[in-house]
Image (cartoon, rainbow, N blue to C red):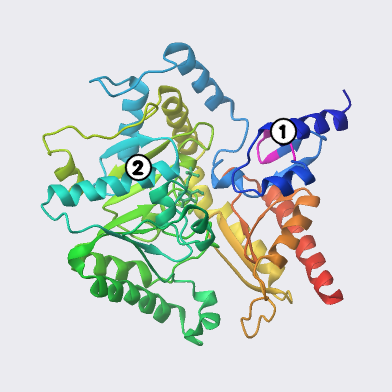
Amino acid sequence: MSLSNQTRHWQALDAAHHVHPFSDTAALNKEGVRVITRADGVYLWDSEGKKIIDGMSGLWCVQVGYGNPELAEAGYEALKTLPYYNHFFKTSNPYTIELAAKLATLLPAGHRHVLFANSGSEANDSALKLIRYYWNLKGRPEKKIHLSRDYAYHGVTMAAASLSGLTPMHPQWDLPLPGFEKVPTPYWYGAKDAGYGNIDADAFGLLIAGKLEEKIRELGADHVASFSAEPIQGAGGLIFPPATYWHEVQRICARYDVLLHVDEVITGFGRTGEWFGSHTYRIAPDIMAMAKGLSSGYQPISAISLGERMADTLLNANEELVHGYTYSGHPVACAVALKNLEVIEKQKLVPRVKTEIGPYLQRRLRETFADHPIVGEVRGVGLLTAIELVRDRKERRFFPDPGNIGTLCRNYCFNDGLICRAIRDTMVLAPPLIVSEAEVEEIVTKLKSAVDKTAKELKKA
Ligand SMILES: Cc1ncc(COP(=O)(O)O)c(C=O)c1O
């Protein structure tokens, strides 16, 4: 079969039988999916033989890049040795035990216990259950409300979607569930547009943290169980908190006895130049969720870690923890995750992101877009970067109908063989941690060309 015929065959089968997540099925079927057939390093190839550079590490997860043979071999060994067993009936296995112990050496201070799950959504869902259980054990069952932020993304289960603050995620499913409340996000670049005027970033960080305090007081601290947040908001548009924000948030949580649930699903495993975003922003979580980079996406696995306070209570309850998945701590996933952590350490990827390739990408983007007429801001930490496309860079004014211009620019990127994500009109990059300087140059050149084409198109309009 020729390449094109093969592609059309797969597209037809996909349209006939496969329901895509986060997609408009009818529109997609008309257009036809792109079929990705293989990947290596930072590159993907589609069924037409087109080579694409992946500026997004898949869905922010492929830390060690594609095609790492050590991870593949670790998975194969585990498949041959112990393809499956569970942890329900007083059993464990060496892969799960060693992964839990290894994580305990990398996690924020006091986090020595982990519970495994299979996705970021499940990890956050489980975290909320553990928070509720904690307050029940403490004799404070009235502490039930879960606070989180506008633009937050915590996943898609009923609870994780309720926690999420991206409003289009709710109406189809009659969410959020009762007991979920939102507070504003420290999105400093959008502050002027949101009516806060020309406020300085540090003052804005304190002001927005203060909104959390106001909300807790309004609801009554006796009713608030937890505050959930990503150290850096990812899918909400790469929102980096001002330097003052996290310190103040932690002061507030401590003052009102509100548990701090930190979602490290994107920010974990070297993405920010530290093992966790909690290290970067000096956050001491009571409970933490992690996924994605834990296995570099090679296997579905996630984990929830417990800080001392929660561990002391939950692990001394003297009763069964009525929770767990068939695949919690799956031996093959744990073997691959363990090898992934070993590769990240061996290749010194975390310090590399902090001192070499992260600053290189940030600098090249800042140089390239310093005076671009439709780029309002370049922002980033480690290998997480965003460029904000705006109508008026001086006045920090966004385009009307957010998303149109970003999508246009993203499509130019795709056509030119670069995967870059558009969130509203923010262009987002999160390449694999192994990306080379030459590959960064390729990403920056392609993105510049796409932004130029977008600006040209706008002039025509
Ligand atoms: C911060 C954050 N939390 C949770 C999730 C959900 O993870 P999953 O898609 O593995 O359920 C994501 C996914 O992108 C995420 O970015």
Farthest bottom residue?
197
Q: Nearer the viewer, mark 1 or mark 2?
A: 1
Q: Which mark is residue 89?
A: none
121 left or right, relative to 219:
right
Identify the residue at image location x=45%, y=32%: 337
Vertical arrangement, residue 287 with respect to residue 406, above or below: above
Percent across and percent down for residue 31 are: 79, 46
319 left or right, relative to 162:
left
Q: Would residue 36 be visible to someone looking at this image? A: no
Q: Which residues are magenta?
A: 34-43
Identify the residue at image location x=67%, y=32%: 17
Identify the residue at image location x=87%, y=33%: 4
Amino acid type, residue under disc 1 in the picture: Ala
Q: Quadrant of residue 209?
A: bottom left
Q: Quadrant of residue 386?
A: bottom right
Vertical arrangement, residue 407 with respect to residue 64, above or below: below
Main secondary structure found in the magenta portion: strand
Farthest right residue?
2
Task: Tell me which label, 1 or 2, sits earlier in the chain.
Answer: 1
* Residue holding disc 1: 16
**Residue in front for this viewpoint, 131 or 389:** 131
* Residue holding disc 2: 106
Mark 1 crowd level (few <14, some 14–19, many ≥20, 10 Å Cα): few
- Is residue 41 in the magenta section? yes
107 left or right, relative to 404:
left
Amino acid type, residue under disc 2 in the picture: Leu
45 left or right, relative to 259:
right
Which corner quadrant holds the C terminus?
bottom right
Percent across and percent down for residue 138 are: 12, 51
Farthest top residue?
80
Q: CA distance from mark 1 to mark 2?
A: 45 Å
